[in-house]
Amino acid sequence: MLLAVGAAWAAPPDGVSSVRFDAGSRVFRMDAAGVTYAFGVNDRQELQTLYWGGRLQESDGFVAAKAGHGVASFEAPANATQQEFSGWGEGLYSEPALKVSFADGNRDLVLHYVSHEVERDGVVVTLKDISRDVFVELHYSMDASTGVLGRSAVILNRTKAPVMIEQAAAASWNLPVGSDYRLRYLSGRWAAEWTLNEQKIAPGKTVLESRRGSTGHQNSPWFAIERGDAKDEDTGEVWFGALAWSGSWSISVEQDQLRQVRVTGGFNPFDFGYRLAPGERLTTPVFYGGYSQDGIDGASRLLHRFEVTRILPQAPHPRPRPVLYNSWEATGFAVNEAGQVALAEKAASIGVERFVMDDGWFGQRKNDHAGLGDWYVNKQKFPNGLKPLIDKVHGLGMDFGLWVEPEMVNPDSDLYRKHPEWVLNFPGRPHTELRNQLVLNLARSDVRDYVLGFLDDLLKQNDIAFLKWDYNRNWAEPGWDAAATEDQKKVYVTYVENLYGILRELRARHPKVEIESCSGGGGRVDLGIMLLTDEVWTSDNTDPFDRLTIQDGFSYAYTPGVMMAWVTDSPNWVNQRTTSLEYRFLSSMQGGLGVGANLGTWSPEDFAVAKEMIAAYKEVRETVQHGDLYRLISPEGGSEASATESVSVDKRQAVVFAFLHSSQKGYPFPTVKLRGLDAAGQYRLRPIHGAKAEAAPEVASGASWMSRGLDVVLRGDFQAAGFVLEEASR
Ligand code: GLA
């Protein structure tokens, strides 16, 4: 409930997020960009959500939080209140944020407010169980430029006995009470990642999750919830969130019997168990949440901006992704010095800036049956080590990147023969091999030290600018037999913490090295890994038509600035579909451009087209990667046509990509109306590689491009066109 209470709040300066606490009402309020978030201590001493939505006026106050009451006498009151972070106890039936077992058998946990500390961009609020010394610190911090709020929890055991944590979320997000919400989420599998799904939020619960030990292809730890029926992608209220965790995770979205809608996310409670010894603490991942009044498109633009300016290792101004060449689809495991040098020479001739040698260069790696774990250079393939190739690549004006899969081992490897105990396993039980490999237990400190050690040596001994860090299987038998029985399930947390620790340490020791997160394509993409890696491999599916929906889905949660896309050979191996080189380039130019084709088979015309396309891409990549993305015509739902537009942050440049699946009955391509331009600015239209527009003026106002639009000429099957608009004057 809102009250005008006059000057309760002192206004924060522009561009600074603020958190304020009103001692009288015991209300916390955070404001930044277009967002206000408020919660308070209620009459039952619970922390209760009061508001999450569009920015309020400074004059808007809140009355003290008041616990809700159910409609039935047999309903425990805890269920009637939208709590920020609930313990499982006193008859709570909704998804708890925290569930514990005490050593004496008690499992009741009731968290009440104790104290708080206001910080520059956030606040830490401490809760405690009503009788036992289990404390929870809730950390809140709001990003000044996007209003995205980061929330996490630290659970502390100050009792004299161990406490078993059975479930721990980072946060619960409560939405205004209602029954007219729709949920969007992403699903997928190998070679078919990032499928966008939409469903009504009905009474009950939907769980998005991974039980696989890593983020997974199947769901992405992201959600967006829209209220009502927005008529387009640019209007309507949207609440969204993304979990920064690369291990097993879960996000539950529930509408309870009082039409309270909440989203709770963190460690996946399935098979979870984290024993906290007296004095120990557990820190949850951070769950980021944001709000937009500009529909689902506005929500993704905010999230992209947040990722680029706050999450990526080079934030707030990440270097645009260099155009790379990758050897995988051209040579598979059959890499050698002469073959790679030949590819590098051709790659350099079309303007590639980074040459990446993929799998096959190490150990006895002839195929995927052997070699993982043995990170020495294969002497048959590279008799003089990697240096001659790297020198050659540098001489051609490119930097050098290398594929590694540090967390894995093939049973057929020296490493496994020496350390069979290093893999995740349950002693005496089968070791399920997937892609003929096992997962090293990175939770073990000896494994962690080994992995950090060999990567550090590799980077010390070779002039490497980039690692493609791959991870090509899911967990089975997640045992950690070297740990005490009660601590073995800590593997879900410690493994990921050690992974992050290795990445952090490598970056500190080799600050110029950039890293790509790959996992059989896009199996490990989340805000946790993005804090430590510069780009991601979107999908092993490089079919340029499939890529349109894959990339569209991806962009709902993640910035095109990390989305790598390669031009590969045609017909493409996935669907045997034949497409022109121009089409393949335009599809890949929607993200970080790469080339993965076998350049040894290209014609002189192919090289000429590629050179022109890469040059055109370099002129627009800052806009594509770090600008604002508008989905002009969605490729979803089998659409015949699709189009995207990226607008630079200063609005001086826009790039349009249009794709046609197949002309039918001679219909022209639908008029493409641009968005996000400066209405009064004059923009000059420039086609990429001979693209054509019907009766388009060369120069027109932003208003004209947005209202009259652009009539793209596209006819045939798998046709594409690209245009650049440059602001001519201001
Ligand atoms: C995974 C990656 C591919 C390639 C292979 C190499 O599948 O996604 O890009 O690197 O591994 O084995």
Image (tube, grey):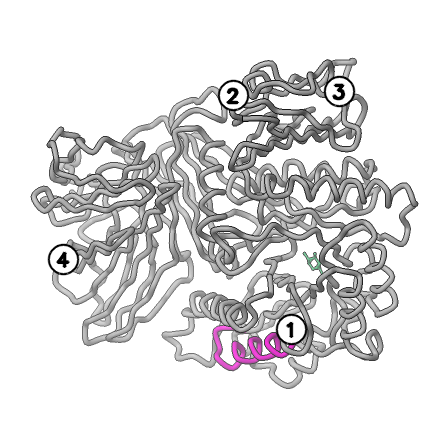
Whether the residues at callouts 3 and 4 have beta carbons within 8 Å, the answer is no
Position of the N terminus, as image quadrant, is top left
The boundaries of the magenta stretch are 441-459
Q: Nearer the viewer, mark 2 or mark 4?
A: 2
Q: Kindly give the residue lying farthest to the bottom in the view shown.
A: 418
Q: Kindly give the residue lying farthest to the front in the view shown.
A: 729
Label 2 to label 4: alpha-carbon separation: 52 Å
Residue 62 location (% of width, % of height): 15, 35
Q: Which residue is mark 3?
A: 713
Residue 539 location (% of width, % of height): 65, 49
Q: Which residue is mark 1?
A: 409
Image position of 418 (left or right of 59): right
What kind of element bears circle 2?
Answer: loop
Image position of 517 (left or right of 387): left
What amino acid type is highlighted by mark number 3? Answer: Val
Q: Nearer the viewer, mark 1 or mark 3?
A: 3
Q: Earlier in the sequence, mark 2 or mark 4?
A: 4
Residue 669 location (% of width, % of height): 71, 18
Whether the residues at callouts 2 and 4 have beta carbons within 8 Å, the answer is no
